[in-house]
């Protein structure tokens, strides 16, 4: 009777250890799946952000240049220049990157420069 009890106790301890190991492996596999899904979703989000940014730049180009048709190469070039300008690159550095003259970049960006209101500066000088 004592041997039977000791044997059952040993078998139950062994089954407990096996159960814990299996549940740990299953949890790791599930965690890896969640990580893979998270990575793929983040990649999709980044791709969508890039697409949205390109669409916004295309829209800006089309709104400013309404009536002047652009070829796809010109539109792509204009989009890249606008993107660099919006990211605060200098006109000289944009010209250097795109291998054109700074005056060409200035002409392209002229419709996009916002006029600053300097009325307050003059009014406050009194």
Image (cartoon, rainbow, N blue to C red):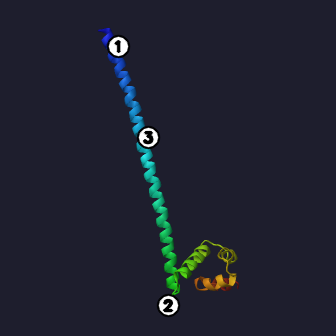
Tag shown at residue 28:
3
Q: What element carries label 1?
A: helix
Q: In this view, does 103 lie above or below 8?
A: below
Of the two numbered discs 2 and 1 on the same chain, state the one appearing first in sequence.
Answer: 1
Asked if labels 3 and 1 touch by Cβ distance under 8 angstroms, the answer is: no
Q: Give the camera-side residue of 85 and 123.
A: 85
Q: What residue is drawn where x is 42% and y is 47%?
A: 33
> Is any part of residue 6 visible from this angle?
yes
How far apart in space, not on screen, are marks 2 and 3 (Cα)? 59 Å
> Could you say which quadrant of the image residue 98 lies in?
bottom right
Q: Which of these two is toward me, 78 or 125?
A: 78
For label 2, the SS is loop
Q: How many angstroms separate mark 2 from mark 1 (CA)?
A: 92 Å
**Residue 25: percent from the left, percent from the top?**
42, 37
Is residue 116 something that shows in the picture? no
Residue 15 sits above or below residue 111 on the image: above
Where residue 61 appears, x then y in whole percent? 52, 82
| Front in this rendered view, residue 83 or 126 | 83
Residue for badge 2: 67
Q: Mark 1 points at which residue?
A: 6
| Residue at image point 50% right, 78% down | 58
Determine the CA span between mark 1 and mark 3.
33 Å
At mark 3, the secondary structure is helix
Tell me the crowding category of disc 1: few under 14, some 14 to 19, or many 20 or more residues within 10 angstroms, Cα based: few
Q: Give the position of the C terminus as an image quadrant.
A: bottom right
Q: Which mark is residue 82?
A: none
Pointer 2 with pointer 1, Cβ within 8 A? no
Contact check, label 2 and label 3, Cβ < 8 Å? no
Q: Is residue 102 left or right of residue 111?
A: right
17 in relation to 67, above or below: above
Q: Which of marks 1 and 3 is nearer the N terminus?
A: 1
Where's residue 37, x and y in %?
A: 43, 52
């Amino acid at each position: 009777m004592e041997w039977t009890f000791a044997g059952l106790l040993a078998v139950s301890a062994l089954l407990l250890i096996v159960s814990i190991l299996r549940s740990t492996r299953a949890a790791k596999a599930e965690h890896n799946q969640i990580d893979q899904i998270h990575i793929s979703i983040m990649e999709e989000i980044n791709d969508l952000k890039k697409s949205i940014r390109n669409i916004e730049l295309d829209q800006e180009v089309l709104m400013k240049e309404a009536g002047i048709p652009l070829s796809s190469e010109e539109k792509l070039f204009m989009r890249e220049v606008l993107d660099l300008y919006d990211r605060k690159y200098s006109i000289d550095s944009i010209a250097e990157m795109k291998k054109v003259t700074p005056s060409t970049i200035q002409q392209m960006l002229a419709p996009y420069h916002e006029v600053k209101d300097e009325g307050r500066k003059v009014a406050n000088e009194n």
